[in-house]
Image (spheres, coloured by chain):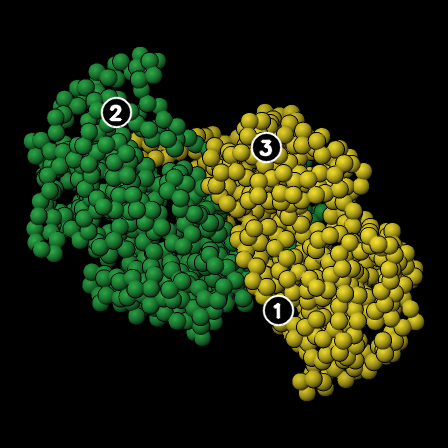
Chain colours: A yellow, B green
Amino acid sequence: MSISRRAFLSQTGKVAAAYPAMLALGMLQKAPAHAFDLPGNGNGKRIVILGAGLAGLTAAYELTKLGYQCTILEARNRAGGRCWSIRKGTVHQETDIAPQTATFDSDQYFNAGPSRIPHHHELTMHYCRELGVPIQVYNNVNEATYFFSEGKGPLSNKKIRAREIHNDLRGYTSELLAKAIDQQQIDTALSKEDTQKILEYLRAEGGLDIDKLYKASDRRGFIEAPGAGDKPGKIGDPHRLADIISSGLADPDFYNVAEYTYELQMTMFQAIGGMDNIARAFEQRVGKMIRFGCEVTDILNQPEGVKVIYKDKKGSNELQADLCICTLPLPVLSNIQHNFSSDVSRAIDYVPYMITGKIGLQFKRRFWEEDEQIFGGITHTNNELTQIFYPSYDYLSKKGILLGYYNFHEKAKRVGNLTHTEREKLALEKGSLIHPQYRKEFETSFSVSWHKTPYSMGGWALYTGATRQTNYKSLLQPDKQVYFAGEHTTYLNAWMAGAFESARRTVADIHARVTDQRITYPTATGS
Amino acid sequence: MSISRRAFLSQTGKVAAAYPAMLALGMLQKAPAHAFDLPGNGNGKRIVILGAGLAGLTAAYELTKLGYQCTILEARNRAGGRCWSIRKGTVHQETDIAPQTATFDSDQYFNAGPSRIPHHHELTMHYCRELGVPIQVYNNVNEATYFFSEGKGPLSNKKIRAREIHNDLRGYTSELLAKAIDQQQIDTALSKEDTQKILEYLRAEGGLDIDKLYKASDRRGFIEAPGAGDKPGKIGDPHRLADIISSGLADPDFYNVAEYTYELQMTMFQAIGGMDNIARAFEQRVGKMIRFGCEVTDILNQPEGVKVIYKDKKGSNELQADLCICTLPLPVLSNIQHNFSSDVSRAIDYVPYMITGKIGLQFKRRFWEEDEQIFGGITHTNNELTQIFYPSYDYLSKKGILLGYYNFHEKAKRVGNLTHTEREKLALEKGSLIHPQYRKEFETSFSVSWHKTPYSMGGWALYTGATRQTNYKSLLQPDKQVYFAGEHTTYLNAWMAGAFESARRTVADIHARVTDQRITYPTATGS
């Protein structure tokens, strides 16, 4: 490695001063959001990449295009990291319970890790396009799914379509506001004409009647569907506002997380056939660079270059490289020997990761579609399940896998402490309260608790305002020859886009250092 | 035909009296929503069906199962009626302008008629399942699409993401209501505890800050997207409420029709490869019964049976049958000779049909996806276009067809009065205001005005409360040997489900008459 960090920083400073002139001369790269055609060549510089998750795969893919020589060390016997789809034969060993093997039918799967692509995650969409991974809509928003509040209150302990609660709450709150405006009880700071328009808007928004009262609306569905002949359909009465509230259905468990959050707004996507097809597509390009079953034990910056010690079946080995990209999740890295700075070391040890888990339940029959007209989407509960996800693929087919729960924090911790059998029992018991068909139609399950999954040890990095200013920033600069990448080095935590963005950022940084030029990694455009 | 109407009615009365006893004896059919296993056999009774649209095809399909002998007379040289997908080579001749032939690429299409299946239209889903028509999500709700208000006001004449207006309006109205409740300016009729909960709900619903003020929210998107490293993302300021209103963006043109209406709530579907694959699937089963190019000129009830006179290439012909199912749209039927009762005759002549049109625009490049991250969904405008639909299939592929407009009533009438070339010009000019890429990327178009399309002459039947009580009811009973079916005999106007429900209802009626039993056509279950 010919460029020391000191020299690099010094060079960068010089180039920075010359930046406007170089931009004018066309000497600088200002790439559009998708393009990544960096100038110059890595000339075979050796890069060791730790982890064959999406960040590591992407780094290897882009670095190889630029003329680098990459080696990926991967502890598991598969690529993809948390981008992992569970299929027949998948084996999973958590830290303290017996291993399980998936016994799903061969055409069934579920995504244990990322299962959704926001349409505005440009790099995720870009790599699907570039690598030819076909995508389909992930049906995140579905008004036909249920709210199920376990507890007290007249509307608890029964399933209620999301559309009923959504439209009732919208109706009552619009009515309250329209009344307040109408009776000039509040100052809207609007002109008389605009006030009239906002009243009309509220009437439409809330589905209010001509007197601006919320009574009933077909938006909340029918008790008897409209049909042919003398069947106009029959609309039910709205739930009482006080009942909705006292039954917990206006509580945070049921806030519109599934549709309002920027990342969860429609349109969302998934890779057809399993999200790990994205990892597989990368693996097709860079698979030869991956050494599987290699568990890193030491990462050591040398005066020049870096030494990585790892264990494989045969024993301990070491690998020398000019530079290293470490994509290992922080809780994993925390158990690896290193000679990083104290700031980096502190970040590695201090940043918590999400406790989270999922269970896939295969059923003989897609009763949620056949009996209940639920095609994709999420049922929300306030119990341990938190949510039930219906599959957004193979609609109208025979069998299917539901996500029986996808939970977080304390709930995920409690469930994670159970054995696979106990988790299945819990998912079936609680799920049967919503779908009694569970009992008759259930076939087999597979559960993953990410915080107990070796080589992941958590869902994703959880930063606070404070740790963003300290620990996070420590990970953004290379520690001598070691660069950090992965969703934990981004503001896109938990998302595949974080892996992609961080890989590109790191590749740009390394390439700038090696080729001694200033490269500005582009900011993705907003909406 | 052995059973006169009088005898039939008399029989029905007798059976009705015995209904409870027969139900107890298992002699009666009480079918679940999907099942349609009627007892008894039609024993080759001859049924002539007018129109090979979805209602006619379904009637033939179900009657054939029951042992009837069906003939379908179809004026066009294709089946499907309004369920029509435009592909390369499709020829279309409207009443008063030159014919056009579609010059789309062979892998491109758009649905000129129905393009969406609500998840709760059980019969539509049922026939897709039974006939093996694969479906995919029709991405009707997409927060990334635009609102474009032509007119005055600071936010007009520019495209604004739906998510910005949705969340700003939600934010401001939640803030107003929270303030009013907080300051006890209105009586919510809620307990103190519940009032606190509704305030928390409003804070979440509106994305309000800790002081219950609406300031900015990432729900409305980013000016700079969050990314790796030092890119937390940058949120823009909300639009001012007064600006939204004065720019027309709270007007009815932009009400949440696309997501609140029961029929338009997610999940929605479409047949993969074109909605007419549903018609094709029926045609595979009953195609041999269809006589194409046969334009009905007379429908005449006889003392027994019915006589239909029709023209084909060779001249005038007649067909005798025991019973007739007439599925022709009323404006078409209005120009056919018949000897129906004056009530039926009046219904045929008086019920108006929707004036509506669509244009498909093929582009070289899916710029809406590549440049603007719009994958499916609908952009709303207040100009002649009314809306632009982005394709919900073949995401990430090279080319695509946009629906350049889909308009109704007066707007559709004005556009319908233009030639195909003029319509294309209008769609491109107005569309370019939203997507300047139109000019460079446009290739070819195809437009359909349904009210000027022979053998349809309108989009769908438009009933009022008054005509439901008069004209509509006249069409629900057979006029002697002639039964009426089609979406105009249902409360599911404009939807394919109307065709299916009406066909089944008519088949049940006919079968009851022929087999002299009481058959209750099931009411579809509500949600």
Instruction: Categorize mark 3 by other alpha carbons within 10 Å: few (<14), some (14-19), many (20+).
Output: some
What amino acid is labelled 1 in the image?
His
In 3D space, how far apart are the residues under numbered discs 2 and 3 (Cα atoms)? 39 Å
The quadrant of the picture occupied by the N terminus of chain A is bottom right
**Where residue B62 appears, x then y in whole percent?**
28, 36
**Where residue A474 appears, x then y in whole percent?**
84, 61
User: From what the image shows, is residue B357 above or below residue A161?
Assistant: below
Residue at x 80% of width, y 56% of height:
A294
Q: Please check whether the numbered discs 3 and 1 fall on a single chain.
A: yes
Q: Nearer the viewer, mark 3 or mark 1?
A: 3
Q: Nearer the viewer, residue A464 or A62?
A: A62
Q: Chain of mark 1?
A: A
User: Residue A34's mark?
Assistant: 1
Q: Please check whether the numbered discs 2 and 1 fall on a single chain.
A: no
User: Residue B40's mark?
Assistant: 2
Q: How many marks?
A: 3
Q: Nearer the viewer, residue A337 or B16?
A: A337
Taking the image as shown, residue A330 lies to the left or right of residue B26, namely: right
